[in-house]
Amino acid sequence: MIIPTTICYIRNAKDQYLLLHRIKKKEDINAGKWIGVGGKIEKDETPDQCVRREVFEETGLRPKKFFCHGVVKFISDRYDDEDMYLYSAWDVEEDLIECNEGELKWVDRDEVLNYPTWEGDYYFLKPLLEGRKKIDMIVEYKGDELVRCEDITEDVVTLKSSLIDCPHGFSTRTGGVSDGIFASLNLGMNRGDDRLRVIENWNRFLDSAGVNNREFVCGEQVHENNVHIATKDDLRPAYGPGEMNVCDGYVTNLKDVPLAIFIADCVPVLLYDRENKVIGAVHCGWRSTVADIQKNAVDKMVTLGSKEKDIAAAIGPAIGKCCFEVGPEVIEAVEKLLGGEAFSFYTRKDEKYMLDLRGVVKERFIKLGLKEENIEFVGECTMCRPDRYWSHRYTKGERGSMAAVIALQD
Ligand SMILES: [Zn+2]
């Protein structure tokens, strides 16, 4: 059982931090300690919603700025394990109210570490006070004794295309807060990972892609060829609410409608028409590819004003010819799609074939009128680099998901 909580260190204009001296609550495991403000994340709350609620309830403050540094995971032989979402907040105008859990005190930055608290707290507080942004740690106690403190912070690695100059990216496994088989940047919402950690992973991925909106368009992918023209009605935050789309591709010409698809070996494609400001995100597994989802995506962009010659395609990390073994039925379908060109994208290996699906996708876009110089491969074979990417085949399905996202915005 993991208890999710938030803690927030609020800074005022005098560079003082708000500490709560826990002396009022009965049976408080934090009794006598000086700590930040926060509490348990309620069911259906996100960490962001929890921290705003807790800060207001306990202090009367409504800071205008909040920043989530990351997750400090507490492991204990005495209490339940805890995922603590660590926040800074600033830009406060209101006066403090009386807090029913203890006494609130503004403390100069230089003095904060001198106030008695849990031994492990110094390890995340020190970098926080020094202005470090990302802080992910594992802190382990036996009784009240600190036995381990591990800084597991990694930068988010998001791959970009040189052909696309609006916010976009292909995620990798690196820089998230999930653990176990989902370590660490899992963006999949239906794979059994912890909801709150996936939300934090999405926040990090969207930030690294340069996307401002926290709502985006995604849905259930069914390996067919349907492409949907997305509008603001399709927007939803990670985990909803709102109805899920059921399709494998999206296009739009609207600002602040980020388009997202999930992948873990299938070919992700981001489309971008710089002239007419039309974008697309397409999930090209082999079934969608031979059903010609590429044509549906390009046709839908054309209905929004694009010309084929202006459309750039970034083809992201996917299983490569080195690893993608397929049966003859797949090769037959590729031959139907590409005709005589198909043979350059596969080789025979005993009774099976090795298929270059990214090559097939690129060739199909060229046939549809995209210029070769407007098509770029980004990233490597997912199955060759399971340390870097989620590969469905490598993990036999025990895995998280990557995503690709693209957005038009001011
Ligand atoms: Zn490979």
Image: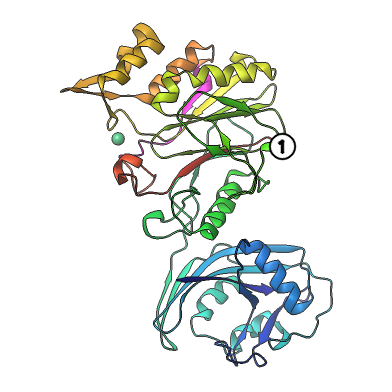
**405 left or right of 335?**
right
Question: Is 145 located above or below residue 389 in the figure?
Answer: below
Instruction: State the extent of the magenta-drawn residues as a range.
Output: 372-383
Quadrant where the C terminus is found in the figure: top right
Whether residue 11 can be seen here: no
Indicate the quadrant of ligand 1 in the picture.
top left
Residue 382 colored in magenta in the image: yes
Q: Is mark 1 within 8 Å of ligand 1?
A: no
Residue 310 colored in magenta in the image: no
Q: Where residue 409 sits in the image (x, y, percent)?
A: 71, 38
Residue for point 53% across, 21% down? 374
Which residue lies under the disc numbered 1?
A: 232
Write down the quadrant of residue 36 in the picture.
Answer: bottom right
Q: Where residue 372 sits in the image (x, y, percent)?
A: 49, 16
User: What's the amino acid at mark 1?
Assistant: Lys
Residue for point 52% across, 57% down? 195
Quadrant where the N terminus is found in the figure: bottom left
